Amino acid sequence: MTQLERRVAEAMIALYSGDAKRIQHFIKVNAFAKLIAEGEGTDERTKEIISLAAYVHDIGIHESEKKYGSADGKYQEIEGPSLARALLTECGVDGEAIGRICHIVGKHHTYTDIDGIDYQIIVEADFIVNCYEDGISQGGVRNVLEKIFRTESGKKLLGESFLEPRK
């Protein structure tokens, strides 16, 4: 973990103070995103963007609950980018990375027109965690695998986590 990643993780933990479920969620998404990114052979800059995006991907959830009375993904996509921009700026993330991360935060519940490996990996890591946290059925997992997953590393992690029989 780089110093920058640590600053962002700690800032998110402070922001979500008292909300253990959400803190656990973004920590798990970050871990799976890093596994997928490594498996796909992404470069160091892309790995950093993926890691930071994983930490802040749901940053708009509390504001969505306050404003709309819902944590629905469409509201998170509306509220998240400006909150992510402020937090990332405060943590010292460079402007180019902030722009890309905010783009991902603003679309991470939209599964069409995925425009980069970084965005794809965040979607896949989030799904792996959500399948567990939401108790998605085997059929639901297979559907996600077929329709959304594109990386070999993500497919392997999802399949081994949910579809392969225990030995």
Image (tube, helix red, strand yellow):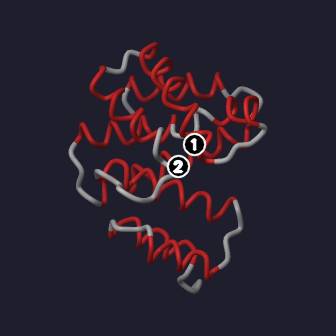
- Please, is residue 154 above or below residue 27 in the view? below
Left or right of residue 138, residue 122 in this image: left
Residue under the point 41% across and 59% down: 112
Q: Where does residue 73 sit, x and y in percent of width and height?
A: 61, 47
Circle 2 sits in a helix, a strand or a loop, which is it? Answer: helix
In the rendered image, residue 36, in percent from the top left (x then y), is placed at 37, 57
What residue is shown at x 39% (from left), y 49% (from top)? Answer: 34
**Residue 106 or 13: which is nearer the viewer?**
106
Position in image of residue 17 (x %, y %): 72, 26
Give the residue pinned by disc 1.
26
Question: In the structure shown, which secondary structural element does the residue marked by tag 1 occupy?
Answer: helix
- In the image, residue 1 above or below residue 8: below
Tag 2–tag 1 contact (CB < 8 Å): yes
> What number is the disc on residue 29?
2
What quarter of the picture does the N terminus occupy? top left
Dot 2 amino acid type: Val
Relative side of 24 to 91, left or right: right
Callout 2: few (<14), some (14-19), or many (20+) C-alpha neighbours within 10 Å?
Answer: many
Give the image quarter of residue 35. bottom left
Q: Is residue 53 above or below residue 119?
A: above
Relative depth, front residue between 96 and 152: 96
